[in-house]
Image (cartoon, rainbow, N blue to C red):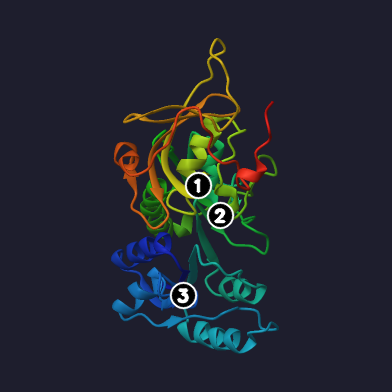
Amino acid sequence: MRLVFAGTPEFARVALAALHAAGHDIALVLTQPDRPAGRGMKLQASAVKEWALAHGIPVQQPRSLRLDGSFADDARQAQDALEQAESEAMVVAAYGLLLPQWVLDMFAAGSGLGCINIHASLLPRWRGAAPIHRAIEAGDAQTGISLMQMAAGLDTGDILLSRALPITPQDTTASLHDRLAVLGGQLIVEGLACAHAWQPQVQSAHGVVYAAKVDKAQAALDWRLDAALLARRVRAFNPAPVAHTAWQGEAIKVWAAHAIAPDATAPHPPPGTVLDVGAHGIAVSTGSGTLVLTELQRAGGKRLGVADFLRGFAVVAGRCFDPPGGPAARPSHP
């Protein structure tokens, strides 16, 4: 099948490679413009762009697809390229730009296959920008991939095909992302092979949950919260933006941790209090239960297991980690 592919990060690159390996003719790739990245903030091409150019596939990088917007010239250039591609469908995976109605109409007009989105959740749960992060944070037992016929709303289109994937207690966003990326590639190849038999299902109005974009402020560990939730956030924000806290004003990233359920018979020091320090972990009191930190990183340092971390950084039992907002935000205790 002759296709246009729109996507940007590694999740999308895996799907693009799977389509190419399955013999589909990728006429054109749309991806986000190059962005500054790394310590030198040099412009860096997306994973999709790098793969497409390495395989001789034309690439367009419009800043917007709105014909009436600030980057109308970009949009018109992309429109011309899409028309010249004469493809049967557009496959979209983590593209990062909204598709305006003219794009949806263009692909619905030909074979009728339209624009097909590879979405990393079991819709209608976790519509939006960060479905993998939010599924782990919420403690979901499973997630999956949905192939969706794209419509004007945010992830509101009809479901063409879906497949579930369990979330393990050890999964981070990094590990779950990689498994979902492979599943997404498999499912789009399977789905296009049986496109003639699609029976689109309207999404239920019940169970709709939005996966809001994650920012760094949300990754600050608030010790007043439940230890189980904090442990899930550590996994959810790995590899980015990474859960973090501070000790006497020095920032510390927390890459791995686990929760211990509350003990009603034990004393309960203020949240953030270090209960125990050892090679097994740094045990910290929370609003309910204990969070044991097992992999940490100082600013400018390497990720280290707790035993190695403690060789170069002193954490003292009985003292407290800083609350979100710094030491000044800590309430006084008589």
Which residue lies under the disc numbered 2? 216
Q: Nearer the viewer, residue 231 or 268?
A: 268
Measured in 3D between alpha carbons, the distance from the residue under mark 1 to the one under mark 2, in whole angstroms, is: 9 Å
Q: Is residue 132 visible?
A: no
Lower sequence index among marks 1 and 3: 3
* Position above or below: 85 against 158: below
Lower sequence index among marks 2 and 3: 3
Mark number, residue 244: 1
Lower sequence index among marks 1 and 2: 2
Q: Secondary structure at mark 2?
A: helix
Which residue lies under the disc numbered 3? 36
Mark 1: few/some/many CA within 10 Å (<14, 14-19, 20+): many
* Position above or below: 216 against 209: below
Please indicate whether residue 258 sits to the left or right of residue 56 in the image: right
State the residue at coordinates (61%, 89%): 73
How far across and down, in percent of the image, does residue 282 sit? 41, 32
* Position above or below: 324 against 3: above
